Image (spheres, rainbow, N blue to C red):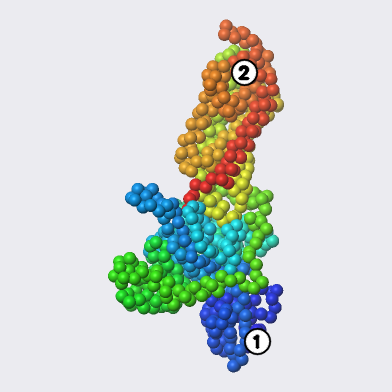
Amino acid sequence: MSSSNVSEYFECVNLEIEGELFARPSNAEVAVAMAESQGSEYFDWLDLERGGELLAVEDDEIELIQAAPLAVTVAEATGHGMIIPFQPLTMTFLNVSYFVDMPKEMRSRGILENRLQLLSNVSGVFSPGVLTALVGSSETEKKILMDILAGRKTDGYIEGDILISGFPKEQRTFARISGYVEQDDIHSSQLTVKESLWFSSSLRLPKEVTKEQKHEFVEEVISLVELDSLRDAMVGLPGSSGLSKEQRKRLTIAVELVANPSIIFMDEPTSGLDARAAAIVMRTVRNTVDTGRTVICTIHEPSIDIFEAFDELLFMQLGGRVIYGGKLGLHSQIMIDYFQGINGISPIPNGYNPATWILEVTTLAVEERIRMEFSELYKNSEQYREVEATIMQMSVPVAGSEPLKFSTTYSQNFLAQIIICLQKYNLVYLRTPSYGLMRLIFGITIAFLLSSVFWHLGSKRNSTQGLLIVMGALSLACSILGVNNASSIQSIVSIERTVFYREKTARMYSPIAYGAAQGLVQIPYVALQTIVFGVITYFMIHFQMIARKIFLYLVFLFLTFTYYTFSGMMAVGLIPNQDLASVISSAFYSMWTLLSGFPIPKPNIPEWLTWCYYISPVTWTLRGIISSELGDKENMIKEPQFNGTVKEYLKANLGYGPRVIEVSAAVLIGFCVLFFSVFILSVKLLDFQRR
C-alpha cells in the first residue's frame, strides 16, 4: 500500500516532513472506521501494540507508517479540519494530590492534622481526538481535579507531575494553548454572537494570523457550533433576554474554540439543560473533539445518550481516589465488564443507564459489603496497568521535540490589547442606554432645573449674599452630576468585572490593558456631558460672558466629572461587593463636600481636621471654579460684616490666594490619575473570585 493511497484518508499537517504519514495510535480505531467506510481493501488490520507504531497491511505487503505523536489528527480525515492549524497535545498526570488547610470546625473536633487531603494520587492521560468524562460521586473531586489540571486553582497545596506531551506543564505557556468552558456562561450581554467571537479571536490568536484568516476562522467556528442563524443576535442577560441557556453554552464553547486551543476543559457543559438542549450541546462538543482537540468534561448524572458520547472515563470516589480510568467501549461495555468482574457487584439491568449504575454499585456501603476498596482494586487491576503503560509512554517526549514556548505572555502587544478592549467597551457602553443616554438626559434635566433656580443670579456679586448664591450654584453644578456619574458607572464595571475574571484567566489581555480601556472609554461620555451641561448652566445662570472664563468653567467641570467617575470605578475595584462599594463611596462623597471649605469655611474647620480639607477633591474643584469666575473681580462690597473687594473676600473667608487656578487644575489632574491608577492596580492585584 503506497503512502499516496493512505493520504486520501489522512491529511499531512506537518509539511516539513515529506513522505511520511503521521497519526495518533489512540485514534487508529476511528481512522480505520473512516477508511473502511471508503473501502475496506485499504486496511486489513492494525497492530497498536508495537511501541506506538501503526502497521497497515495490504496484499501481504507490510508498510510501516511511523506514528509520530501529535503531528496529524484524525480530524483532517473526517472533514473537521479548520483553516488555522494547531498542534494536538497529550496531557498526562501522575500521582496528583491536593490538600487544603484543615478547617477550623474540624480542628475543634480534635483532628490534629494541619492539612485536609481532597485528591489522592490521581493519574491519567488525555489524548487528542478523545472525549474524556470526569465523573465522581460528588461534584467536588472532579471539579478540583479539572481546575488543578487547567491551572485555575488559586489556593491549597498541589503535589504530583503534570506533563504536556512529555514536558512539565508551565502555566504561562499552557494558558495560551488551552481553553476552559466554565459552567456559568459569562459574556458581555451587549455584544452579538459574532462580535463576542471576534473579540476573543482578535486577542487570543497569534498576531501572525491575518485579519482575513481570523474572519474566516470565526465563520468556521460559528458553523461548527451551529450558531449560523444567531450570528447577529445579542447575547443578552441570562434568563431575561438574548440567547437561551443552551445557545449561551454553545457560545461559551465557541469563545474558547476561536482561540484555537489544543486542549479544552469543559465544566458541566449540559448542566441545567433539558434533554433536547443537552443533545445539541453534546453534538457541539463532539464536533469539537472531531477537530482533533483534547477535550475533557466534568459531567453530573448524564443520560445514557450523553454518557455514551464519551470515549474514555476517569471516575473518582469520595476522597479523591480513582476507581476507574480508561476506555468506555461501545455502549460502555469495557467499563461494565470491569465492574461486573468484581465479586459481589450485581450485573447491570437491561437498558439501565451505565452512569447511574456505576454510581450505585461503587458506594461506600457496597465497599463495606464486599469488604474491598474500589480504589485498591483498580490499582491492582489489568485496567490500571494498561492506563499506566499509556501514561509512561506518553510521558516521554518525542525525540527531537521541544517544550512549547512563547516569546510573550499574551498573543497581542499591549497597545493592540488596549485598542481591541476599547472597541469592545465602546460597544458595551453605546448599547447600554441606562448608562450613556440616561446619564445625558439626567444631565440636561439637572442643568435646566439648576439654571431655573439660579436664573440670572450669576451676575450678582455686590453683596456677600450674592456671592454665596453664585458660589452655591458653582458648587451644586459640580457635585450633583459628579456623584451621579460615580454611582451609574459602578453597576456596569461590577458586571463586566465578572467577564474580566474569565478573560484574564484565559490570558486574553493584561489587566492593565483592561483597566486602561475601561477608563479611556469614559472620556468621550464625560466630555459630551461637560459640554451640554456646562453650556446650559453657564448661560442660563448668566456667569461672565468671557471666553477664558467659559473655558475654565468647562475644564473644571470636566476634571470634576472625571475624578468622580474614576472614584466610582476605584470603589468597585477595591471592594468585592457592588452594594458595599456604593455605600462606602457615598460616605466619602459626603465627607468630601462637607470638608471642602464651602459649607464650613476653612478658618472654621477644627485644626485636627484641616488635613481633610486638603485631601478632599471637592476642595480643589471649588477653589478652581470659584476663583476662575470671581477671583479677579474688584467689585466693592460695603456691608457691616465685610468692607472690601470680591477678591479680598475670597482671600479672607475662603483662603483663595494667587495662582489658585493653576494649582487647583494640577491637583485635580493628580486626583484623576490617582483614582485611575488605583483602579488599574486593583484589577491587576485583587481577585475576589476564589477557586
Q: Is residue 190 visible?
A: no
As shown in the figure, which amino acid type bears the numbered disc 2? Answer: Gly
Q: Quick one: 583 or 236, which is closer to the camera?
A: 583
Q: Which residue is mark 2?
A: 655
Q: Quick one: 312 or 91, which is closer to the camera?
A: 91
Q: Residue at x 39, y 65 (%)?
A: 317
- Residue 350 spot, x, y in % from top left: 33, 77
Q: In terms of sequence position, does the residue under pointer 1 or pointer 2 come before the other? A: 1
Q: Quick one: 137 or 278, which is closer to the camera?
A: 137
- Please tell me whether residue 16 is drawn above or below residue 598 in the rendered image: below
Q: Quadrant of residue 31?
A: bottom right
Q: Which mark is residue 2?
A: 1
Does residue 624 appear left or right of residue 348 in this picture? right
- Residue 284 spot, x, y in % from top left: 50, 67
- Count of number-bearing discs: 2
Q: Residue furthest left?
A: 369
Q: Residue at x 58, y 58 (%)?
A: 171
- Please tell me whether residue 164 is drawn above or below residue 442 in the rendered image: below
Q: Residues within 10 Å of mark 1 (few under 14, many from 20)?
A: few
- Residue 513 spot, x, y in % from top left: 62, 48
Give the SS element for disc 1: loop
Q: Quick one: 360 or 51, which is closer to the camera?
A: 51
